[in-house]
């Protein structure tokens, strides 16, 4: 990945960005301009009554974790849209498309990272589909380089479809540690190994992707589209 890019990371929920792209954010945040947007809030799906004060506080707390995590990686340009977690399939997809379109028009990225369509989490799949629709060739917010990323505890748990990376970015041991430090901001998401969202889980995947690409550690992505203009 070259420097002096404007990179937009589109995530369904706060923490997906760190799990999928934390290593490259750490590696390149001083040389590229990053913006991270979160479509849904990531907390209300755990409650039956989603509009009470407890849920609102949880959403605010998770958003604060998102800001703190990205700050550790050198990113301060962050937006939260806080659509209802686990319920993106109840929202007209054109509404999500418009969020992404407006972000692309305003920010002007030349690289976009979004979710994989192979994920077990339906919100992830919807964000993937919406990103493809919003940035399609011929549209006013077309981007030439589009990647999808994998999210532990989602991408590897959809056993009928498999995330198949075709682009690997080496990361250092320090990048991996900074990625873990950022993920630890989400205390409610961390569990002991063999749960994927543990240090051992992150390290195991980084070593495996590194082994596939002749590196000690790496993050893996699927290059969906690259068009030179």
Image (spheres, helix red, strand yellow):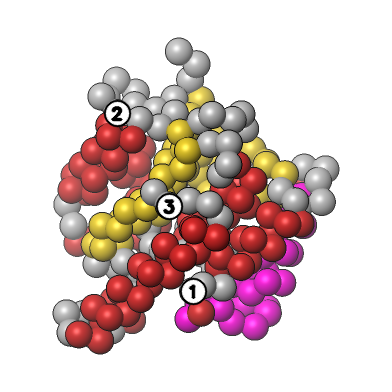
Check the image and name the residue furthest to the top: 229
Query: Can you identify the residue that label 3 sits on?
Result: 76
In the structure shown, which secondary structural element does the residue marked by tag 2 occupy? loop
The disc, 1 or 2, on the residue closer to the chain's N-terminal end is: 2
The answer to whether residue 112 is seen in the rendering is yes
In the structure shown, which secondary structural element does the residue marked by tag 1 occupy? loop
Q: Residue at x 64, y 38 (%)?
A: 167
Q: Is residue 51 left or right of residue 20?
A: left
Crowd tier of the residue under label 2, counting other residues whose Cα lies within 10 Å: few below 14, some 14–19, many 20 or above: some
Q: Residue at x 26, y 57 (%)?
A: 81
The disc, 1 or 3, on the residue closer to the chain's N-terminal end is: 3
Q: Is residue 165 above or below residue 173?
A: above
Q: Is residue 208 magenta?
A: yes
Q: Residue at x 56, y 55 (%)?
A: 73
Q: Is residue 192 above or below residue 138?
A: below
Query: Can you identify the residue that label 2 sits on?
Result: 141
In the structure shown, which secondary structural element does the residue marked by tag 3 occupy? loop
Main secondary-structure element of the magenta-colored stretch: helix
Instruction: Report the quarter where the N terminus lies.
Output: top right
Q: Where is residue 53 drawn, in percent x and y? A: 20, 85
Q: Is residue 12 magenta?
A: no
């Amino acid at each position: 990945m070259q420097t002096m890019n404007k990179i937009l990371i589109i995530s369904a929920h706060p923490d997906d960005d760190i799990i999928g792209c934390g290593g490259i954010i750490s590696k390149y945040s001083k040389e590229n301009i990053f913006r991270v947007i979160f479509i849904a809030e990531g907390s209300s799906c755990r409650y039956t009554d989603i509009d009470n004060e407890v849920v609102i506080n949880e959403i605010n707390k998770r958003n604060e974790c998102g800001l703190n995590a990205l700050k550790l990686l050198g990113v301060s340009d962050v937006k939260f849209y806080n659509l209802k977690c686990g319920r993106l399939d109840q929202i007209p997809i054109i509404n999500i498309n418009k969020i992404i379109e407006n972000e692309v028009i305003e920010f002007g990225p030349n690289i976009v990272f979004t979710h994989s369509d192979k994920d077990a989490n339906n919100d992830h799949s919807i964000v993937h589909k919406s990103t493809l629709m919003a940035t399609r060739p011929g549209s006013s917010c077309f981007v030439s380089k589009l990647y999808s990323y994998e999210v532990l505890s989602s991408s590897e748990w959809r056993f009928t479809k498999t995330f198949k990376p075709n682009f690997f970015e080496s990361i250092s041991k320090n990048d991996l540690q900074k990625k873990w430090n950022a993920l630890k901001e989400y205390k409610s998401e961390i569990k002991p190994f063999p749960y994927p969202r543990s240090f051992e889980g992150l390290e195991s995947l980084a070593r495996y992707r590194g082994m596939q690409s002749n590196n000690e550690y790496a993050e893996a992505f699927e290059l969906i589209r690259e068009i030179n203009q």
